[in-house]
Amino acid sequence: MPKDSNQPVNDFNRRVSDFNQRVIDEFRANKGRLTGHFAQARLLLLTTTGARTGTPHTTPVGYLPDGGDRVLVIASAGGADKHPDWYVNLRADPHVTVESGAFTCPARAVVLTGEERERAWARAVEADEGWAAYQRKTTRTIPVVALNQIANGGPPNVNASSLAEAIKVVHDAFRRELALIRQEMTAGGPTLGAQLRVNCLTFCQGLHHHHSGEDLALFPFVEDRHPSAGPALRRLREEHDHIATLVAELRRVVTAPAGDSAAARAEVERLTLDLEAHLTYEEEQLIPLLDAPA
């Protein structure tokens, strides 16, 4: 039989597919926690619709926080001369699904252009020179894509089977992100880079929204069904106020023109210590109540 000239390419594609599937399986099984090479990476699962097949296609993709309800992904393909398949797919259909580990949400992809793309690219390169190395390997301009979350009009879709599990899943997501920020600050120089500022501000905003949601919905829900939890809930609300003060101070330091890395690192350490105590106490008090039979 004649030798298949496409066999090396097919073998490579199969290895890539198998590797991606292992990452996807681990990501979903552990709510975004990964081991090995990706243990300290910001990774999400991006599901696009195949431009030719029309079938869903899920790919692990690195991302950059961008404040609000959007994140940025970069179609580097490791510096290859062809755009990655997921980018081709979202150009054909910008409606995508994003899995962050804690949450799954629909999003709309927008390819950044002009000055907006250049600012985002400069932030990415400042944070990780590897992006520039990829650009040097190819003649194509590597695209930067914003994934804008589409509001569903209700509570977020947490990847959990119960309200008790949802508390732990969301808390662990905050723990992981704060650990990454601490690591980035330790590795950084005397001034804060632009992307690290955005990472901090995005974290602060997410934590504010989470605590606001608990104050407005979760805590009244628990209090109505478990009146004995009143003292614990009062303490948790007081801790929310205290953490809000710490968050405001971190925002102030991060947005200061000087961008003092040491001052920001000190505020992150203060926030980490008190936030961990708060999350642990909340889990100890609320999870047993929510796990109890109705």
Image: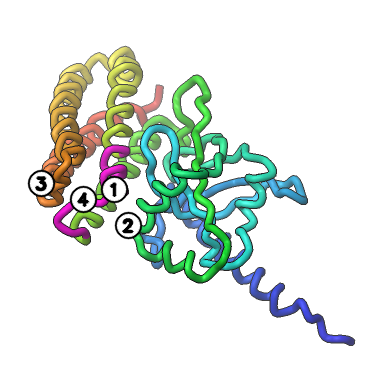
To which residue does mark 3 refer? Answer: 263
Disc 3 secondary structure class: helix
To which residue does mark 2 refer? Answer: 126
Amino acid at dot 1: Ala
Disc 1 secondary structure class: helix
**Residue 107, position as x, y percentages in the image:** 54, 36
Mark 1 in CB contact with mark 4 (< 8 angstroms)? yes
Mark nearer the N terminus (1 vs 3): 1
Mark nearer the N terminus (3 vs 4): 4
Quadrant of the rendered image containing residue 158: top left
Q: Is residue 200 magenta?
A: yes
Front residue (pair 3, 157): 3
Q: Is residue 147 visible?
A: yes
**Residue at position x 37%, y 60% in the image:** 39
Answer few, some or many: residues within 10 Å of disc 1's Cα (few below 14, many 20 plus, some between 14 and 19): some
- Distance, label 1 to label 4, CA atoms, is 7 Å
Q: Is residue 190 magenta?
A: yes
